[in-house]
Each structure stands twice: as C-alpha cells, then as structure tokens.
Image: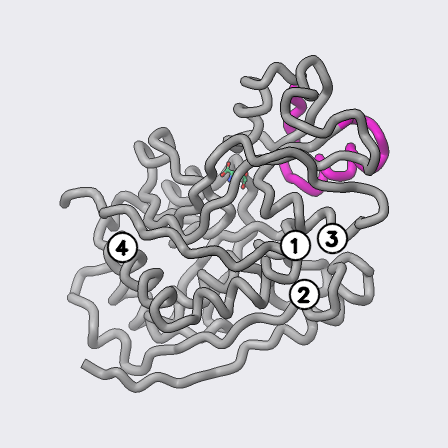
Amino acid sequence: MNLNRTRIAVVSVAAALALTACGSAGDDDEGGGADVDVKEDAAAEFDDGTAMKEFAEAGAITIGVKFDQPGIGFKGATDDAPTGMDVEMAKILAGSLGIEPDGIEWKETISDNREPFLEGGEVDLVVASYSITDERRAVVGQAGPYYVTGQQLLVKTGSDIQTVEDIEGKEVCSVTGSTSLENVEAKGATARGFDTYSECRDQVLDGTVEAMSTDGSILLGYAAENPDEVEVVGEPFSEERYGIGYSLESPEMCEWINETVQKSYDDGTWADAFEATLGKSGVETPEPPAPDACPAA
Ligand code: GLU
C-alpha cells in the first residue's frame, strides 16, 4: 500500500476573477478551492475489474455538477473549471484515484437529467446537490450523505411571505425533477418548474413569481449575489441529504465513495472544502453526517 500523498493547492484564480468581474460572487474569495490530496500509485490499490481501477489507470473521470449554483457548483462563462462544495467533493474523490483536478471532465447536470446521465454513462459520478431518495436509489446508486440541508424560501426583501405557511395559493418557482418542486406543491403553492435554479431566481428578481424554494444552501448562494434585493426566509421544512450518484452497474463504487468521504471528515479536508465554498455564503460549518451503509452486494 502506498500512502505517499502529494499536497497540491487548487486555486481557481480565473474563476475568482471572473466571479468578481461580473459581480456575481458576493465575495472575492468565492472561486477559491481547498487543498486536495492526490494519491500516488492509486491504481495499485484497487482490484482488477472495478470501476475505480479503470478510472485510476486512465487518469480520467467524468463528473456531473451544477454550473449555476454559487457555493455548490458554479461555472461562469469565462471560467476554466467549476467551483463550490460539490466540486470540492468531486476533487477529493478523484484525488483518491490519483486523478488531478485537471484530469476531471466536468459536465453540467441539471436536476432533471442526473439519473439519465448516470444510467446512460454520460457521467461516472454526479455530485450536484443531489438529495438521497428511495425513488432515486431505485434507478441509480447514491453513496453518502456528505452534507445535510433543508428547503427554505427566497423572496424579495420585505415580502409578505416569511414562512412556509404563507406560500399557500401563491406562485412559487423551483426546478423540474427536484425534491423541492414536489415539496412546494405539497404545501399548497402553485408550483412553477424551470430547468435551472438561476432561471427561477430571475423570476423572483423581476417579480414574476413571489418566491423561489429549494435547499437553503442553494438559496444562500443566490442571496449573497443580490443582498439588497432578496432574502432567505423561514425555517427549513424538509431534510435534504446530499449523496453522490454512481451507476448501479458498478455497485463497488459505493464503499470507495463512503470510505473517501469518511476519510475527508477525519483528516479535515471536508471542513477545509466547506469553509472555502459554502462557508463563504454564511453557512456555519456543520458536523458532517455519517454515510449510510452501502446496499448488500
Ligand atoms: N436537493 C434537492 C434535489 O436533489 C434540490 C436541489 C436540486 O434540485 O439540485 O432535488
């Protein structure tokens, strides 16, 4: 077993500059990442025939992340690579396979195409604010969780809507294929589904809908971009446990993902990643959740 590790600094300077230039980051440091370990001779650690061995030998992996959720998964038009907590988790996983961040092929996923992308092999992993649900676990693997958040509301500052009880009968937007849209409907709102959260956010900004609803971690990133115009209100009214999606054709990936997530908790990499990303939107670094047991082989 080779435990040599190379400590490399991953600093997305271009991303930070681009975010600052277009005024969308809300913070000069938004584009910065944490330090990621890249394991040497990683391929030797995995059994023949496993997906992990294949990725490690190829030195390449394709990972689906969001491109429009600041703090979680964000890539501006002129950025070379995405940034955010999910992106950091993806780098941690790739690093455990000996793959440098620039060996990762980043693919944009939206909420509605995460399962089809995994099932069709367009991506090897999905790390995209991807709540673990029984319905999703029936068609794809979801290891983790690595983070827990809850659904809240984003409204124009001073709105009549201040709690989830206030959305009954009101027009509220969210995203098709998300748990958020279903939850909003269940609370009696007239739900409007878009492809992406940034489209939904624009509807709130221009007054077309009265509120947007999804995970608090996502909303805080948008609120930080327009602090004078919008605010996050209400207590969380759901529990969203973020998992890492993989194909059920490679069930061996579950243990590897969970062990890598656990190691990132133990060695402080997870906390560093959190502080460098979501921490910048004002989210306190929480106690990380224990990953679920993997399904029996
Ligand atoms: N975490 C929720 C979900 O997976 C909402 C965020 C999203 O759509 O990515 O559906």
Residue type indicated by callout 1: Pro
Q: Quadrant of the C terminus?
A: top left
Residue type indicated by callout 4: Met
Examine the rendered structure and indicate whether residue 105 appears above or below residue 200.
Answer: below
| Circle 4: element type | helix
Mark 3 lies on residue? 224
**Label placed on residue 92:** none
Mark 2 lies on residue? 30
Q: Which of marks 1 and 3 is in front?
A: 3
Give how far across and how far down residue 140 sits, in percent.
Answer: 33, 40
Please say whether residue 54 is visible from this viewpoint.
yes
* Marks 2 and 1 close (CB-CB < 8 Å): yes
Let me know if residue 281 is in the magenta part: no
Q: Label 4, label 3: how many angstroms apart (C-alpha)? A: 35 Å
Q: Is mark 1 within 8 Å of ligand 1?
A: no
Disc with the residue nearer the chain's start (4 vs 3):
3
**Label placed on residue 70:** 1
**Measuring 82% from the left and 61% from the top, which residue is drawn there?**
22
Q: Label 1, label 3: how many angstroms apart (C-alpha)? A: 9 Å
Mark 4 lies on residue? 253
- The magenta segment is 191-210
Examine the rendered structure and indicate whether residue 170 appears above or below residue 53.
Answer: above
* Marks 4 and 3 close (CB-CB < 8 Å): no
Let me know if residue 196 is in the magenta part: yes
Q: Label 3, label 2: how many angstroms apart (C-alpha)? A: 11 Å
Disc with the residue nearer the chain's start (3 vs 2):
2
* Marks 1 and 3 close (CB-CB < 8 Å): yes
